[in-house]
Amino acid sequence: MKSARRRSRELATQGLYQWLLSGAPAGEIDAQLRGAQGFDKADQEHLDALLHGVIRESAELSADLAPCLDRPIEQLSPVERAVLLVAAFEFKHHLDIPYRVVINEAVELAKTFGGSDGYKYVNGVLDKLALKLRTTESQAGRTNR
C-alpha cells in the first residue's frame, strides 16, 4: 500500500508534467488534481507544498540542478524534469525527510512514470545534488557505507 506522502509525490509529478507541457496556471492544475483518482489518499498539505512550491521556484530549482546534468534541463523528458524538480524542492525545503528517502522516492517516481532507464539518470543526478544541497548529511551517509 502506498503512503500518503508517496501519493502526494505522484500527483505533484503528474501536475508538474502537465504544467511543463501546457504552461497552465498552478490553480488550474491544482483543481484538476483534486478530481484525480487517489487524491483523497494523498497527503494534501505535502502535495500543495510540492506543486505550488516547485512552480513558484522552478527557475531557482532548475539552476540548482543544472551543474548536475549532462545537458540543458529543457532537453530532459518532462517526466524526468518533473521528478527532479520535486526532489530538489524536497532537498531544500523538507529537511525532515532524509536525503536517501528523497532519492528513493524520486527513483520510484521515475520508474512509475518515466522511460525504461530514466530512473538511473534521476538517481545519478540526485546523488550529485545531495552533495550540494545536503552536504553534511550526504557526506556522512557516504562514510557510513
Image: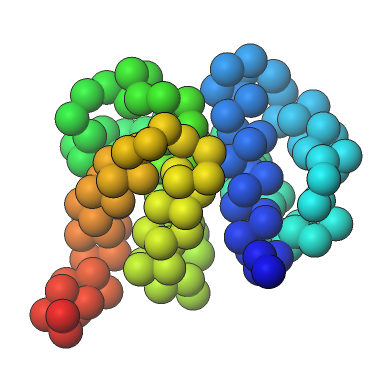
Q: Residue at x 33, y 18 (%)?
A: 75
Residue 50, given in percent of the width and then of the height, sits at 60, 49
* Residue nearest the viewer, comparing 52 with 2: 2
Q: Residue at x 22, y 77 (%)?
A: 141
Occupied quadrant, residue 35: top right
The residue sitting at the top extreme is 22
Residue 65, given in percent of the width and then of the height, sits at 30, 39
Position of 92 relative to 73 (above/below): below
User: Which colouring convention does the figure follow?
Assistant: rainbow
**In the shown orientation, is residue 34 left or right of residue 108?**
right
Figure quadrant of the N terminus: bottom right
Figure quadrant of the C terminus: bottom left
Position of 122 relative to 139 (above/below): above
Q: Residue at x 27, y 74 (%)?
A: 137
* Residue nearest the viewer, comparing 141 with 64: 141
Q: Is residue 52 visible?
A: yes
Residue 85, given in percent of the width and then of the height, sits at 45, 41
**In the shown orientation, is residue 22 left or right of residue 121?**
right
**In the shown orientation, is residue 59 left or right of residue 11?**
left
**In the shown orientation, is residue 127 left or right of residue 54?**
left
Position of 92 relative to 80 (above/below): below
Occupied quadrant, residue 66: top left
* Residue nearest the viewer, comparing 11 with 96: 11
Q: Residue at x 35, y 68 (%)?
A: 100
Residue 63, given in percent of the width and then of the height, sits at 32, 34
Position of 138 relative to 113 (above/below): below
The residue sitting at the front extreme is 116
Numbered disc total: 0
The residue sitting at the bottom extreme is 144
Q: Is residue 60 visible?
A: no
